[in-house]
Image: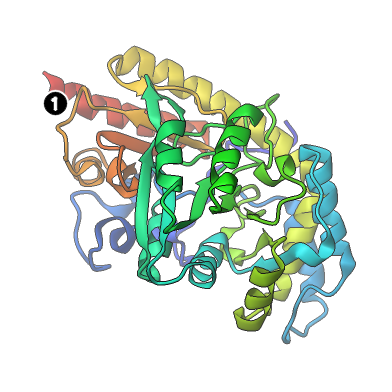
């Protein structure tokens, strides 16, 4: 490989959520709260950023922008950004969209919070498929909009949509919006075209607008292919698509994402109410990622493929009652350890206190997720091996 994904990078004293903010985020604890192990001893497998350095092509582009020396109010005016992102989308997904539909946001989460407020009236409802990224729920809660959940069907760790249940809930005239995840977080499913079409037909036939969060679309296993939901409905203006380079290139802190809004009425509200200045370094970084980051991403995916194979073999040997499938997308492992823990147990606290591992438990994913843990595998293999060793050692000790 050209790039060294085995390098361990010291992230201390960088204001990193991963290193410095885990007490507040995972445990809602004060920053000075003591835990049984020194901070340096923890293996971090929780928040969804990577332990890999952002590609040099992005850093070099940012350095060049720094040399311009002025960082005043900035927006995306240069058409080269749109052209770079469009080429990325066309070459990888066979999907394109007109420039006037593209807006930017300081993250997909802020976009979700805004869009729910713009789209839903106070007495209407938002549909999500569970287990779900918690911020889908938070976006509805923030606007005091009722949440409706449709549980995915789980066949030994392989998730599919319950179309009958989705249709029954979409038929409620108060359900006006579905926040959808494609590929799915936390299960890692890449929804096949026939699955997307059946889901999309149900929503659109029942006048349910869809926000499709596709932030993980670049992070798929080598040889597989992602299909944007909107690609299947080129004549519809009822699908808003959210994508970003942030997960793909480990630049979430630059706070920059793409939102494609084909609906003229929603776009008008967005432009009236959205504060649409951008960080100049973020624009530069995103454009460089789309123009020059392809080779780095290809090598990253190969490294992640091997990490998942390693995890599958390790868990199979040392934790045989756990249920784990290599996900089709994301760098996140979704593992059912129900054979080793009690229902309702606080799993992040268990592993923090007894194994010096930081991870996220199923309780962070709304519902239909108890006894699961989510593991971030975007780390050097030595770190992954140590984290898995500690997890398995603790669970096997408890099982005796």
Name of the residue lying farthest toward the left: 400
Residue on which disc 1 sits: 398
| 134 on left or right of 231 | left
Query: Residue sitting at 66 percent across and 30 percent down?
Result: 193
- Please identify the quadrant where the C terminus is shown: top left
Query: How many numbered marks, from 0 up?
Result: 1
Query: Residue sitting at 59 percent across and 26 percent down?
Result: 305
Using the rendered view, name the quadrant where residue 72 is placed.
Answer: bottom right
Camera-nearest residue between 367 and 305: 367
Q: Is residue 49 visible?
A: no
Camera-nearest residue between 157 and 387: 157
Q: Is residue 175 visible?
A: yes
- Residue 293 lies, with reference to residue 280, above or below; the image says above
Location of residue 378 in the rendering, given as x and y in whole percent from the top left corner: 53, 39
Location of residue 77 in the rendering, given as x and y in whole percent from the top left corner: 84, 75
Location of residue 54 in the rendering, given as x and y in whole percent from the top left corner: 65, 52
* Badge 1 element: helix
Query: Residue sitting at 40 percent across and 40 percent down?
Result: 168
Location of residue 103 in the rendering, given as x and y in whole percent from the top left corner: 71, 67
- Residue 295 lies, with reference to residue 15, above or below; the image says above
Query: Residue sitting at 26 percent across and 52 percent down?
Result: 38
| 359 on left or right of 189 | left
Camera-nearest residue between 173 and 79: 173
């Amino acid at each position: 490989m050209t790039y060294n994904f085995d390098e361990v990078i010291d992230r201390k004293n960088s204001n990193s959520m991963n290193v410095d903010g885990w007490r507040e985020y995972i445990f809602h604890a004060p920053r000075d709260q003591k835990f049984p192990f020194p901070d340096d001893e923890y293996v971090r497998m929780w928040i969804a950023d990577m332990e890999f350095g952002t590609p040099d092509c992005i850093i070099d582009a940012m350095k060049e922008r720094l040399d311009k020396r002025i960082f005043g109010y900035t927006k995306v005016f240069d058409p080269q950004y749109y052209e770079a992102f469009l080429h990325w989308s066309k070459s990888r997904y066979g999907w394109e969209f007109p420039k006037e539909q593209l807006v930017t946001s300081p993250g997909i989460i802020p976009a979700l919070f805004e869009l729910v407020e713009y789209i839903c009236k106070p007495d209407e409802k938002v549909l999500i498929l569970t287990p779900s990224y918690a911020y889908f729920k938070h976006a509805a809660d923030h606007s005091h909009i009722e949440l409706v959940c449709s549980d995915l069907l789980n066949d030994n760790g392989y998730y599919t949509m319950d179309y009958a249940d989705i249709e029954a809930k979409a038929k409620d005239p108060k359900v006006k919006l579905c926040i959808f995840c494609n590929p799915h977080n936390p299960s890692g499913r890449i929804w096949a075209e026939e699955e997307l079409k059946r889901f999309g037909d149900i929503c659109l036939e029942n006048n349910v607008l869809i926000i499709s969060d596709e932030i993980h679309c670049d992070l798929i296993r080598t040889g597989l292919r992602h299909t944007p939901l909107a690609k299947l409905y080129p004549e519809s203006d009822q699908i808003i698509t959210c994508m970003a380079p942030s997960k793909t290139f480990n630049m979430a802190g630059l706070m920059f994402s793409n939102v494609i809004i084909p609906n003229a009425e929603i776009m008008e509200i967005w432009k009236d109410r959205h504060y649409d200045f951008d960080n100049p370094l973020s624009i530069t970084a995103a454009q460089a990622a789309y123009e020059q980051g392809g080779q780095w991403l290809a090598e990253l995916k190969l490294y992640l493929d091997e990490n998942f194979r390693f995890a599958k073999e390790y868990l199979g040997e040392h934790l045989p009652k756990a249920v784990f499938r290599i996900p089709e997308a994301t760098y996140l492992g979704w593992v059912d350890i129900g054979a080793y823990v009690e229902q309702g147990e606080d799993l992040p606290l268990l592993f923090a206190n007894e194994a010096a591992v930081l991870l996220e438990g199923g309780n962070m994913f709304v519902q239909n997720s108890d006894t699961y843990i989510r593991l971030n595998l975007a780390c050097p293999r030595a770190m992954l091996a140590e984290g898995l060793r500690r997890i398995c050692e603790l669970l096997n000790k408890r099982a005796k």
